[in-house]
Image: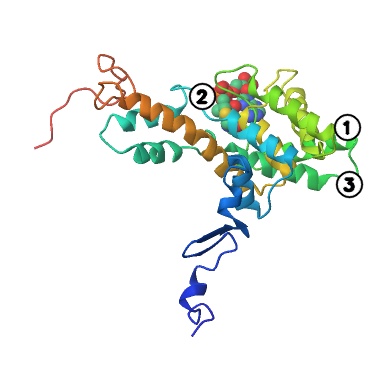
Amino acid sequence: MSERQKLSPSDWWATSIIEMKPGMIRYRGYAIEDLIGRVGFAEMVYLLTRGELPSKPAAKLLEAALVAAVDHGPQAPSIAIARMAMTCGVGINNAMASATNVLGDVHGGAGEQCVELFNAVAARLPEGARDAAAITKAVTDEIEALAARGIRHVPGFGHRFHHLDPRAPRILSLVDEAAAAGAVSGLFAAIGRTVEDVIAQRRGGKRVPMNIDGATGVVFAELGFPPPLCRGLFVLSRSVGCLAHAWEESQSDYRNKGPIPRDQIWTYTGPGPRKVPE
Ligand SMILES: CC(C)(COP(=O)(O)OP(=O)(O)OC[C@H]1O[C@@H](n2cnc3c(N)ncnc32)[C@H](O)[C@@H]1OP(=O)(O)O)[C@@H](O)C(=O)NCCC(=O)NCCS
């Protein structure tokens, strides 16, 4: 019998996150009644995912990142899907799940790869080196390594809609403030900015600005979140927009709403009319 098979029923789901008995709920050792009313939602996210309550500046940065990504309008596939799903007669949770399911490598989920990239750059820096030249070299080497693997679009940069994503500079300014106060290192903000510069150098000066995944990636990397959790954090944030849009759409009288108005039809590219073979 394997060690796992020998586990008692109570150890089967052993967890360090929550302790519960009749009349008692503790998260990471803190009684829920002490947390309620004292701890914000972002702090609770940090506590559950990281094991400790964040410092105030860390909580402020996480909160800012979670606020920044809530919604990008029905032009964003996730939001459009939330709205379409809602007109199909499903419950609001189904609409939210359908929407968040499309937050992948290209839409909304790039934060995971972006933080991997930032971490890989940091790992390339010689021990203790934080100067601009060392960061530029490490970024250039990492972008070349991505290109050698066939990755042309650097995760966390570029946007179909915004030439300058207004969320990114604001988030970076908050990271700068936290770094000036000594709350975070500021290294990942420097790496993020350098990635943008290096992409521009490689494109003959044409800039591809940092997007929301890049900017929130800077925050998550500064706070030390492991990359897969970063995608989950984006999903938490975008869920708010998905919820609001699903609810708004449910208040309309549309039923079974498609991705384009029904009087517009797609371009057919297949064979012309033909007879079914005998
Ligand atoms: C978001 C994204 C899909 C937008 O794509 P797009 O508007 O179709 O951009 P295009 O692919 O047309 O790119 C336009 C030019 O910018 C370049 N470019 C765009 N994003 C780039 C990136 N992330 N890294 C390097 N170059 C990029 C393209 O190579 C292209 O160059 P060219 O004009 O020399 O051919 C794309 O930027 C991307 O895949 N980014 C990485 C994934 C990501 O961060 N997604 C989250 C989006 S919020």
* Amino acid at dot 1: Ala
- Mark 1 close to ligand 1, CB under 8 Å: no
Give x and y (percent) for residue 152: 63, 33
Task: Confirm or deny contact between disc 3 and disc 1 (CB under 8 A).
Answer: no
Q: Relative to 145, is 67 above or below?
A: above
Residue 78 in view here = no
Q: In the image shown, does 254 or 203 lie closer to the viewer? A: 254
Tell me the distance, in whole angstroms, between the alpha carbons under discs 2 and 3: 39 Å
Query: Mark 3 or 1 closer to N-term?
Result: 3
Task: Write the residue at 75% across / 25% down.
Answer: 173
Q: Relative to 183, is 52 above or below?
A: below
- Mark 2 close to ligand 1, CB under 8 Å: yes
Give x and y (percent) for residue 167: 64, 23
Task: Write the residue at 42% across / 35% down.
Answer: 99
**Mark number, residue 126:** 3
Say which residue label 2 marks: 72
Tell me the distance, in whole angstroms, between the alpha carbons under discs 2 and 1: 34 Å
Classed neighbour count for the residue bearing mark 1: other residues with Cα under 10 Å, few (<14), some (14–19), many (≥20): few
Q: Quadrant of ligand 1?
A: top right
